[in-house]
Image: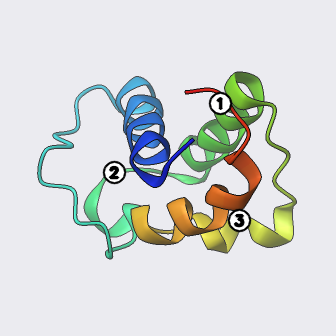
Amino acid sequence: MTAADIQKAILDILSDIAPDEDLSDLKADVPFRDQLELDSMDFLDIVMELRKRYRIQIPEEDYPELASMNSTVEYLEPLMKNVAG
C-alpha cells in the first residue's frame, strides 16, 4: 500500500467509527483527538479495525504513533508495504 492508500484506509476506518464527523477538513498534522470527538474506546476501535482488516499488530506502546494522519501513515507505511489495497 502507498501512503495515499493508507490515508484512504484510515479515513474509511474513521468514517465507520465516527459516522457523524466531517472528515473532509481533517488536518494531517493535527492529532485526531483535537479534531474529532474520539474517546479512548474509539481509538482502540481504530487499532482493532487495522488488525481485523489488514492483520497489522500494533503494540500498545506504539499507540502514540497513531495520533495524527501524518504520524499514522508514517508509522504504518513500512508495516503495510506488502498489503494489497
Q: Which of 63 and 82 is in front in this view?
A: 82
Disc ID at residue 49:
1
**SS for callout 1:** helix
Estimate the x, y position of residue 76 in percent, counting from the top left: 65, 56
Marks 3/1: CA–CA distance: 14 Å
Please tell me which residue is depicted at 84% across the width and 62% down the height of the picture: 60
Estimate the x, y position of residue 15 in percent, counting from the top left: 35, 30
Marks 2/1: CA–CA distance: 18 Å
Q: What residue type is labelled 1?
A: Glu
Q: Which of 48 and 75 is in front in this view?
A: 75
For marks 3 and 1 on the same chain, the one whose residue lies earlier in the sequence: 1
Estimate the x, y position of residue 53 in percent, counting from the top left: 68, 23
Q: What residue type is labelled 2?
A: Glu
Estimate the x, y position of residue 43 in percent, counting from the top left: 58, 49
**SS for callout 3:** helix
Task: Tell me the quadrant of the picture where the N terminus can be found.
Answer: top right
Disc ID at residue 63:
3
- Residue highlighted by disc 2: 37
Which image quarter: residue 63?
bottom right
Q: Is residue 7 above or below residue 45?
A: below
Which image quarter: residue 29?
bottom left
